[in-house]
Image (cartoon, grey):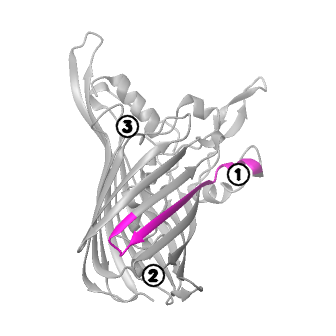
Amino acid sequence: MRKLTTLVLIFLVAFSKINAQETQNTITTAAPFLLIAPDARAGGMGDIGVATSPDANSQHWNASKFAFMPSQFAIGIVYTPWLRELTNDVFLGGFSFANKIDDRSAWATSLKYFNLGQIDLTDINGAPEGTEKLNEFSLDASYSLKLSETYAMGVTMRYIRSDLGIESANSTIKPVSTFAVDISGYFQSEEKNYGNFNGVWRGGYNISNIGPKVSYTDDGQDNYIPTNLKIGAGFDFILDTYNKVTVNLEFNKLLVPTPSISLNEDGESAPYIQDDVGFVSGIFSSFGDAPGGFSEELKEVTWALGAEYMYDNSFAIRAGYFNESDLKGARKYFTIGSGFKFKSSKLDISYLFNASDINNPLENTLRFSLAFDFGQLFEIN
């Protein structure tokens, strides 16, 4: 990545502010990297994870799942290339660590790092003007507790920093830092017999990134961080000792105000703008502020369907589909993936097939994640 024009393109994609999408009234936020699915297991099922079985990367999806974690310790390492068709030094990486304190509670921490690559700046004559390295990251910690044998809740505290300014180019964009909170819940039923197979029901929700607005410039408009609601459900078809099939359905909605149409002095429609209200008021108003009414509110809800086949808890095949309204970003894609377990280690791989006319930053990209489970085993249900 050698030219500033490439940097601008990356910003546009990362912030989802492509002009063609703005005319469709998409919702934009600061630090959108917080919504990127970090792990390949979820990536293979259409970016689903709020109600799937617990794993080392549950911190991003639903921290309350850690209370049902079968092992005492779990470590997760993730790597996701970004915009691989344009550059090779933009990626999302991170790690997580979880500790099951006892049969009812657990704590976890994770780091997510979004690298925007090295930028070599030149003037109009090609003379060097400096090098910049832009990045964003979040660091968080969570605690989860079983309130019953089948239900747990969790809370997560998160520190967020976004540094997108180019100092050597006298950019007006400044680094921003803020804090946010997640509140989550997870239900996992006892295993029951349903005739020819046994089954387990799962359900979950997570309200993530609840926090104040930030501003990238001293005199600029404040930006909402991506407060998001996830709700999902799933069912495990336990066919026998070795074979299990899981299906999951998940819904997502950004809990930030929808841009509304403003009028200029001549009474004509002007560009869409977001209402300047507090982040708490923005959460509640986000359920009914779309200019198009209830029908537009429904279009702001994305949905995803995913499935996983597991053999002997050691080999998995996954598939999924993600759908977003054409008026709200038009992300549509299929995913496939697989997973392998050897003793206490797990390797997951996923791949995305774009099904939309809008380019996807993860097209033709393999995602990887590695996990380790060790320590005392806990009996779940």
Residue 315 magenta: yes
- Mark 1 vs mark 2: which is more N-terminal? 2
**Disc nearest the viewer among 1 and 2:** 2
Residue 178 percent location from the top left of the image: 41, 55
Report the residue that reaches farthest toward the front: 196
Q: Amino acid at mark 3?
A: Leu
Q: Quick one: 125 or 231, which is closer to the camera?
A: 231
Neighbourhood count class around disc 1 (C-alpha, 10 Å): few under 14, some 14–19, many 20 upward: some
Residue 340 in which image quadrant: bottom left
Q: In this image, 267 relative to 141: left or right?
A: right
Q: Quick one: 309 or 146, which is closer to the camera?
A: 309
Q: Amino acid at mark 1?
A: Glu
Mark 3 in CB contact with mark 2 (< 8 angstroms): no
Q: Residue at x 56, y 61 (%)?
A: 229
Q: Which residues are magenta?
A: 295-316
**Disc nearest the viewer among 3 and 2:** 2
Q: Amino acid at mark 2?
A: Asp
Label 3 sits on a secondary structure element that is: loop
Number of labels in the image equals 3
Give the residue pinned by disc 3: 83
- Above or below: residue 279 compared with residue 72: above
Q: Residue at x 41, y 70 (%)?
A: 310
Neighbourhood count class around disc 2 (C-alpha, 10 Å): few under 14, some 14–19, many 20 upward: few
Q: Residue at x 72, y 54 (%)?
A: 288
- Mark 3 vs mark 2: which is more N-terminal? 3
Residue 55 in which image quadrant: bottom left
Q: In this image, 64 relative to 189: left or right?
A: left
Residue 337 percent location from the top left of the image: 40, 56
Give the residue pinned by disc 2: 240
Give the residue pinned by disc 1: 297
Residue 348 magenta: no
- Above or below: residue 307 compared with residue 295: below
